[in-house]
Amino acid sequence: MQGYRVHSFGDPGIYRREDLPDPSTGPGEVLVRIRAASLNYRDLMVARGHYNRNLALPLIPLSDASGEVVEVGTGVDRFQPGDRVAAAFMPAWIEGELTEAGARSALGGAAAGVLAEVRVFPQDALVRVPEHLSFEEAATLPCAAVTAWNALWSDRGSGRGTLS
């Protein structure tokens, strides 16, 4: 499979296309052919080394993508080949308070990103893409959704960030 990796921090021109190992699914996992990925400001900060200079290199960049299910591992009951999906920004943070493990699972940072032909995800880290959205449109939503959630809920004690 082809993908891009960052080997040193700098401008986004440092993304290098290269051959990467073909991933395979394990129990509860889904193999997704990436059909579209979007570039967020965070992705630029990661590539430039402004986000966290302690990230292990090389890394596969970008956090937001959508695609089509190619294969499902044993025990997967929410998806089947052909389904259109988008990945969660932090696959290990599905609900509740953000934990350190959840934060470390942010794609395109400490965890491998999505700028590759295919990627394996836990089934719980995927959502269906509605038919009325293109793959490109769906690929712009995961990080934007986390930003919106953060604006609504992260500062409840101050009177900001609430729905009331």
Image (cartoon, grey):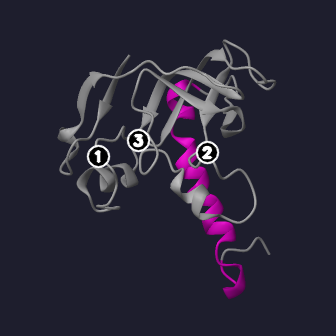
Left or right of 12? Residue 90 is: right
Say what amino acid the circle numbered 2 marks: Pro
Pick the front one: 53 or 159? 53
Left or right of 82? Residue 76 is: right
Chain-order first, disc 1 or disc 2: 1
Q: Where is residue 91 shown, x and y percent of the image?
A: 61, 45
How many neighbours does mark 2 have within 10 angstroms: few (below 14), some (14-19), or many (20 or more)? many
Question: Label 3 vs label 2: CA separation?
Answer: 14 Å
**Considering the numbered disc 1 on the image, is that residue within a helix, a strand or a loop?**
loop
Return the mark for residue 62: 3
Q: Is residue 96 above or below residue 31?
A: below
Indicate which label's residue lies in the foreground, 1 or 2: 1
The part of the chain drawn in magenta is: 134-160
Chain-order first, disc 3 or disc 2: 3
Q: Is the residue under label 2 in contact with that under label 3 (CB below 8 Å)?
A: no
Return the mark for residue 91: 2
Instruction: Give yes or no for residue 114 being in the magenta stretch.
Output: no
Q: Is residue 86 above or below residue 10?
A: above
Q: Where is residue 162 shown, x and y percent of the image?
A: 73, 74
Left or right of 6? Residue 20 is: right
Indicate which label's residue lies in the foreground, 1 or 3: 1
Say what amino acid the circle numbered 3 marks: Leu
Q: Based on the displayed image, in which of its 4 quarters is residue 13 positioned?
A: top left
Image quadrant holding the N terminus, namely top left
